[in-house]
Amino acid sequence: MTQPIITLRNVTKRYGTHTILKNINLTLESGKFYTLLGPSGCGKTTILRAIAGFMTISEGDVLFAGKRINEVPANKRNVNTVFQDYALFPHMTVAENVAFGLTLKKVAKDEIAQRVAKALQLVQLADYGDRAISALSGGQQQRIAIARAIVMEPKVLLLDEPLSALDAKLRRQMQYELRDLQQRLGITFLFVTHDQEEALAMSDEIFVMNQGEVLQSGSPVDIYDEPINHFVADFIGESNILPAKMIADFQVAFGGHQFECADAGIPDNEPVEVVIRPEDLTLTTRDQAKLTVTIDTQLFRGDYYEIAATDNLGNAWLIHSVNPAEDGETIGITFRPQDLHVMRFGEKEAEFDARLETYEELEGDNVDET
Amino acid sequence: MTKRRTWTYFLPYGLWLALFVIAPVALIIYQSFFDLGHHFTLSNYSTYFQSATYLKMTANSVWYAFLITLFTGLISYPTAYFIHQLKHRQFWLLLVILPTWINILLKAYAFIGIFSQAGLANQFLTFIGIGPQQILFTNASFIFVATYIQIPFMILPIYNALDDLNPAFINASRDLGASNWQTFRHVIFPLTLPGVKAGIQAVFIPSLSLFMLTRLIGGNKVITLGTAIEEHFLTTMNWGMGSTIGVILIVAMIVVMLLTGDQKREGGTPR
């Protein structure tokens, strides 16, 4: 494990009686792409501001490469920010904007020119140096904002919803470019977004936040496949979440039936919730079905059909299927045990991880048997 | 139909504009070409440009207006900046605006009381042992009172410019390593410059033609263009000459407007 570049230790932020951040602990390693993901108002931008130094935290410590930087002002921190609305200085040209930080540092003129040119080249706007900011499109302003930050060669780049103002196509393109840029520069990116698709596509590690707390952290695949609770499952991707009851280890009951699953370490008969992703559900004949549902509506999404259906207990189901179904048809659905994910109510991330460890070996054996 | 209605809305202000702005300006220009005997002439202008007194008076007016604007600006920018940081800004702003609701003549008389031989200012000077001084009817007291009167008109546009400034610019500047002072110099001040220019327009131009204060506070030692116009219209009855100076004043206003107007910044032209 490399030395952590940024550590937040028990960070709390209060405004009056209102708590914005509740005891945040997180560690960022050098050279990775991190994402803070959560709905608006969950505190993700506040974390960014705490790291950048735009506000003081109420409790806890912010560490940079092991050193406490709580009292270090923003202009002395070796991190740079790409702002949500770009905050490019309108009274300066593109080149002046990018050169701003270097000029203040009294870097030699020809070195500034060279570094600015390189930064502009990196964001593919090499010829735009003497343009006015107002003459740039949103996407170009976005790139200049990135150039202005990376020209400072920060250890950590903070990005505050930088793609939210762009149209869908440009946003997708910028996702690739940002990821590519991060890997080429080899610096740490901390990216804030409320767009789960963006987070899944770009990140090495995601922190899912809600109401001032980090609910779950992990790789995109971990978070997608094993969400810790209803909120995370619902927020990341589309999902079917059903009330269920744990019968025994690897046995869970919902929708009037008992199914084999991949989860254990939960007391028998505990009420739980089960998540099944729409793409893990397969349409099948009724005699091969684990459950039968009636098709309500379906939408053609290009590469798949999005099918809304209801089972005989009234639970709504969302199914992604390559083949279409017929409206009103009663059809069978099936899934594999590992497609079920069981979530306990109120389980914290640490408890979840600990529980996972207790049966991971067991689970391996179990899978062998089936 | 809709076009005609729009015109109807404009009518009251249009009439006002025609009767009290366009007509007087036209009249002033017209009058400036007539001498005392009502003959068409250019002599008023030649008199103006050949007379050392008039030219000196103009220079004087510009100089004093400049000083008043300068002092007003030096006081107003920090004040506006400070008020903008405060919690109850609207309240403090109200305190700034409040004096403008009081008639300028009343304020001038109040200062006569304060600055007079036995006034508050001299009582204080006596108290600290300096002894009474001649304060009233000096150039300094004229600039002081004029500055006092103009301050609100400078604070307001600067305050508005500061209020319009996106705080993200300040954060961005700090983020890129600028100290507080560098942020102010390179980001805050240039971006609030339009407010300063609006303030200069609101202060410099009226200061050119101040005449009440020059008499009441300045003791007629400072003769500004405003004083000259008043003298020509009310005392010497030389309306032609008064109008000529009026035209000079209007030209000066236009020059100031052009100098402080929004210039298109160079460099940033798209290719």
Image: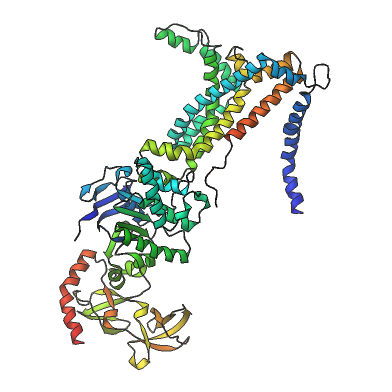
Residues B42 and B220: in front is: B42
Which residue is outermost to the bottom? A287
The x and y percentages for residue B13 are 71, 39
Q: How many marks overall? A: 0
Q: Residue at x 60, y 16 (%)?
A: B214
**Above/below status of A55 relative to B221:** below
The percent coordinates of residue A36 (x first, y second) are 33, 59
Quadrant placement of the N terminus of chain B = bottom right
- x and y percent of residue A166 in the render? 47, 60
**What residue do we see at 61% from left, 12% from top?**
B220
- Would residue B25 be found to the left or right of residue A50 on screen? right
Q: How is the image coloured?
A: rainbow
Point 33% across, 82% down: residue: A255
Which residue of the protein is positioned furthest toward the front in this rendering? A110
Residue drawn at the location 62% of the way across and 14% of the way down = B215
Residue A303 vertical position relative to residue B220 in the rendered view, above or below: below
Question: Could you say where residue A263 lies in the image, as x and y percent from the top left?
Answer: 22, 77
Vertically, is B207 above or below A90? above
B54 vs B91, left or right, is right
Q: Is residue A165 visible?
A: yes
Q: Is residue A305 left or right of residue A21?
A: right
| Residue A261 falls left or right of residue B28 | left
* Residue closest to the eye, A276 or A92: A92
Q: Nearer the viewer, residue A52 or B259?
A: B259
Residue B171 shows up from this direction: no
